[in-house]
Amino acid sequence: MCEVIYIKIDILTLFPNFFNGILNESIIKRAIENKQVEINIINFREYSPLSNKQVDDTPYGGGAGMLLRCEPIFLALDTIKEKDSHIILLSPEGSTYNQKKALELKKYKHIIIICGHYEGFDERIKSQVDEIISIGDYILTGGEIAAMAITDSIIRLIPGVINENSLLTESFNNNLLDYPQYTKPAEYRGLKVPDILLSGNHELINEFRKKEQIKKTKELRPDLWEEKDE
C-alpha cells in the first residue's frame, strides 16, 4: 500500500462536543488548515430510525445496562462508507493499540472510527468493521478519548505534519524509548547537563544518545527490549 499524504477520518460518536479541543489546537489544527487531514465528527444519533432518536436499548436475555442498537451504526456507515474505507470499532476486547498499528493505519486514505458507549453494543455491529482496537486494559465511559488518541497518533505521522527528524528519534521508533534530553541552563540547582552534550562532537553525542536509549528501554520498558531482542 503506497504512502498517503492526505487522510480523511470520520468519527462516529454520541458526544461530538468532546472533540472541540483536539480539533482546534496545536498540530491537529494546523494539519486541518493545511489540508493534510479532514476530520468529520458525526453524531450517529441522527441516523436513528426511531422517532425519539433513541440509540440504545435493553439487552435480549436480560442483563444490566443498555446496549447500542445496530441500526444507527449501519445507517451511518451506509452513508459515509467509501470503497477504500477502513472501519475501526473501539472496544476493550480489541487488539491493544501501539505505534506499529499507528504506522499501519496512516496508510489508509479513509478511516472510520466508531466510539462505543453505555454497557456495550449489539454484536451485529462487528459485521461492519475491519478491526476492533483497544487502547489499554482499563475501562472508559466511552470510546471518545480512545478515538482522540488514535487520531492524534495517526495525524502526526502524515508526511509534512511534523519534522521527519523528530519522528525518527521519538519513543517507540525501533522499539526503543526516546533518549534523555536537556535544554538551558546547563546547570540548575546542582543538576548538570551531561558534558558530552556540550562538547559539540556530534558523532560522540549520537553514540551517547543511542546507549541512553537502550539503557532507558531496558530499565523502564523491558518488555519492549525483549521484543526488539527477539
Image: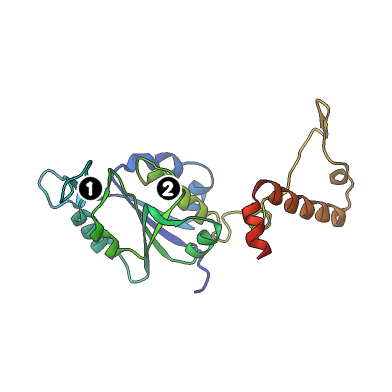
Q: Residue at x 55, y 61 (%)?
A: 100
In the image, residue 16 above or below residue 12:
above
* Camera-nearest residue between 102 and 17: 102
In terms of depth relative to the viewer, which is nearer, 78 or 32? Answer: 78
Tell whether label 2 touches label 1 (CB within 8 Å). Answer: no
- Please state if 4 lies on the left or on the right of 53 as rendered: right
Q: What residue type is labelled 1?
A: Leu
Please report whichever mark, 1 or 2, sits nearer to the chain's N-terminal start. Answer: 1
Q: What residue occupies the far left of the structure in this picture?
A: 51
Q: What amino acid type is highlighted by mark number 2?
A: Ala
The one nearer the camera, 104 or 27, is: 104
Q: How was this image coloured?
A: rainbow
- Secondary structure beneath disc 2? helix
Image height check: is 29 above or below 4? above
Q: Mark 2 points at which residue?
A: 146
Alpha carbon separation for disc pair 1 and 2: 19 Å
Residue at which label 1 appears: 67
Horizontally, is 226 left or right of 87 in the view?
right
Query: What percent of the width, then of the height, locates residue 173?
Result: 64, 58
Q: Where is residue 48 in the image (x, y as percent from the top left)?
A: 17, 51
